[in-house]
Amino acid sequence: MNLKRLSSLFSNVIPVAAAFAWIAISLPSQAQTGRIYTSDDYSRAADLLNAGTISLVDHAVRRATFLGGNRFWYLDTENGLPTMMVGDAASRTKAAAYDPMRMAEALHAAGLEEKDAKRIYPDEFEPLDSDRSVRITIDGRRYRCALGTAYRCSLELKGPDGTPQPSLRDASLADFSPDGRRAVFLRDWNLWVRDIATGTEKQLTTDGVKDYGYATDNAGWIHSGHAIVVWSPDSKRIATFQQDQRKTGEMYTVTTRIGHPHLETWKYPLVGDKDVTMIERVILDVDTAKVTRLKIPPDQHRSSLCDNLVCHAGWEDVQWADDGKTLAFVSTSRDHKVETVRIADVGTGTVRDVFTESVPTFFESGYAHVNWRYLSKRNEILWFSQRQNWGNLYLYDAGTGKLKHAVTQGDWNVDEVLYVDQETGEMILTGTGREPSEDPYYRRLYSANLDGKHLKLLTAEDADHTAAVSKDGKYIVDIYSTPQKPQVMVLRDGSGQPIEEWAHGVITRLQAAGWIAPETFHVKGHDGKTDVYGLLFRPANLDPSRKYPIINFIYPGPQGGSFTTHGFIASRGDCNALAQLGFAVVQIEGMGNPKRSKAFHDEYLNDIGINAIPDQISGMQELAQRYAWIDLDRVGMWGHSGGGNATVATMLRYPDFVKVGIAESGNHENRNYEDDWDEKWVGLLQTKADGTTNYDSQANASFAGNLKGKLMLAHGMLDDNVPLSTTLLLIDALVKANKDFDLVVFPQAHHGYGPVAGAYMMRRRWDYFVSELMKATPPHEFPMPALLPPAR
């Protein structure tokens, strides 16, 4: 349900059910009922998924990363082959860092499972030894590779004799120091550190025990072996916590296998639990192994943004001073309504409160990223707040806690703070909704100053912009695109002036294959006055004289909506594939989701059982008035996770509207979901005098008797995110109400179904819509190819 979770869904579950595209194929109009679909029809539609489109787009660079100084790296893809490029902003030069084919062979020899160079996308990259060798991070594992006549790679976390260290178990779970010399990791509930050069290990904590361990990554829905830490800038100290789960309730999954099943058990707090996970903050001196406990009571396991301590870019709610002597952090209340900014003396553990912000609904410190900053050199806190209905920045005195002034103002949102110069106060950031635009979700680049003056638009293009900024702020790598036009990468100076176009996406071969861009549209929300935005995928070879069923792909949020991005992706899951089978397909960003006003986000507050749903209905109704070929008598809907919940909720609350629904792994009963996510959006569990609760209206089982349409439910039996019980409780209610439904269960699948089961589910989805909406015959047991995750 959070964005990170949806992202992992898109790379694993609906894998390419998570990347949506549109490629026209030469099929006759299929709005007629009674048609018999062939394997060729399905094959052509399957070609429109990510695996079929990935090699048809060239030079559409997705992101760039500065290495320090003027150099930056990016992946430039041609004919499906990603090449690591290193650019120099000052000299305006660029060159391939290595041969991708030879590097793939060397990485595979060093233990990387993937050996196809077209599927290797490094997460991090660093040239070493005057570019004679490189460090590459892939899926969390760091490899050091020597270049030259013979490429040789080795996993960086190996012992002095060159053999893997079995005690570490998984190198992807290590967290490296800023200077690259050491890495910390978890072993037996304690933190250890390893010297990279020698392989020497040292234990940093000794009193960690099961369910009361250090730096453990467990938010209920996620329970990994990765250590949650924040290194000091000088690589000498670590900020972390001892996590107390001794009284936290448990969750279970049971494997399906021959013989006795295996029971997996982990800590998973639920809504309303008296005892939930708490953290006790500590500072570790890596050289001496001294543990300094911060002198405050245990904190809630909460983030100022998401429903885990780590959101998208590490533990952002903990930030070191530049000199490493103090530590700023934010404490969030259980209901996410109170945020307290605190500063700790790392030598003594003394903590002082700087200021507190309390809100009537829920607080968020940004959108995809936490936007507050500890400006220690200035003794200030840059703070993000929606106190005036929009996401703006405010400057506080870190000593007195007094508000100095607003840094940004107006009816628009600061999306991400990219750069702050503490000496001059100059800033570079992205923002949304300030400029007239085809899509208010498009991010633009701005410069600003901490003095609250001099805000300036840096990018004129009406498109979605992402950017990387050099450490000194002199250069910006700006990458912009729309759903219809691929990425353009432009090098700009710090004032936003374009210097040179660095890369330009080419979709000639994609268009030659028949790709048709989705249409960006806006319609009125359920209130009849608020604009909501979406994408429309038109049926292939549209005949306006015919009627076409419409399918709504929904993810209701409220932490994020149906779009993975408002920029360009060649393939958007199977939206385009379904369009090629003769359906109109829509994605609508309904009210109740972020990146508009706070009032927009609060629209369905405390009633997320219908979050964004009325806007899907009003939106499709307006589209049908606009386009007579849309058939509102044949409406389908599907979604995964929160989208599964929303699909069923729509069918039960508006039973005459959606005729066919497919709900995958839905959180149909939020009292059986993890505490943090629900208690933020619905509030703390309250039991009324009559025994009912504020969560009753969120439960799909409460409305089971209303079902009229055709419904297919699906769930993985090993789902450790949304428990299987949430679907089983719905099934129990449907049975008691004597309602028919269809069911697909995956015995070995988690929340993401994986490439094989995911492909099977996609095929069943196509069959269901073809059979029940088209009243047509799908090909029998079409062998859908295993789905690949989208390129990063």
Image: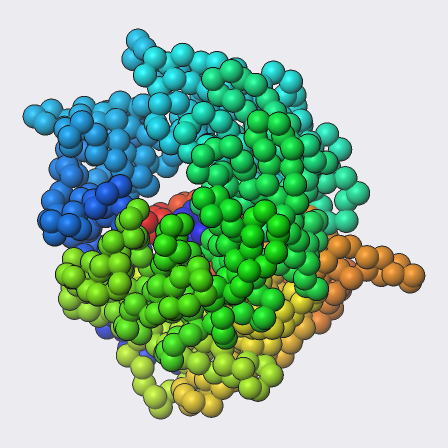
Q: In the depicted view, which residue is nearer to us: 261 or 673?
A: 673
Q: Quadrant of the N terminus?
A: bottom right
Can residue 482 be seen here?
Answer: no
Give the colour scheme of this rendering. rainbow
Q: Residue at x 22, y 60 (%)?
A: 492
Q: Residue at x 58, y 51 (%)?
A: 304
Q: Left of 417 or right of it: where is 55?
A: left
Q: Residue at x 57, y 27 (%)?
A: 347
Q: Quadrant of residue 539?
A: bottom left
Q: Residue at x 53, y 17 (%)?
A: 289
Q: Eyeballing the image, is 332 above or below 582? A: above
Q: Eyeballing the image, is 144 above or below 742? A: above
Residue 578 at x, y percent in the picture? 38, 67
The furthest residue to the left: 149
Residue 268 at x, y percent in the picture? 67, 39
Q: In the depicted view, which residue is nearer to us: 709 or 639?
A: 639
Residue 179 at x, y percent in the picture? 35, 28
Residue 751 at x, y percent in the picture? 53, 46
The furthest residue to the top: 161
Q: Left of 259 or right of it: where is 24?
A: left
Q: Left of 408 or right of it: where is 106?
A: left
Q: In the depicted view, which residue is nearer to us: 80 or 483?
A: 483
Q: Eyeballing the image, is 84 above or below 595? A: above
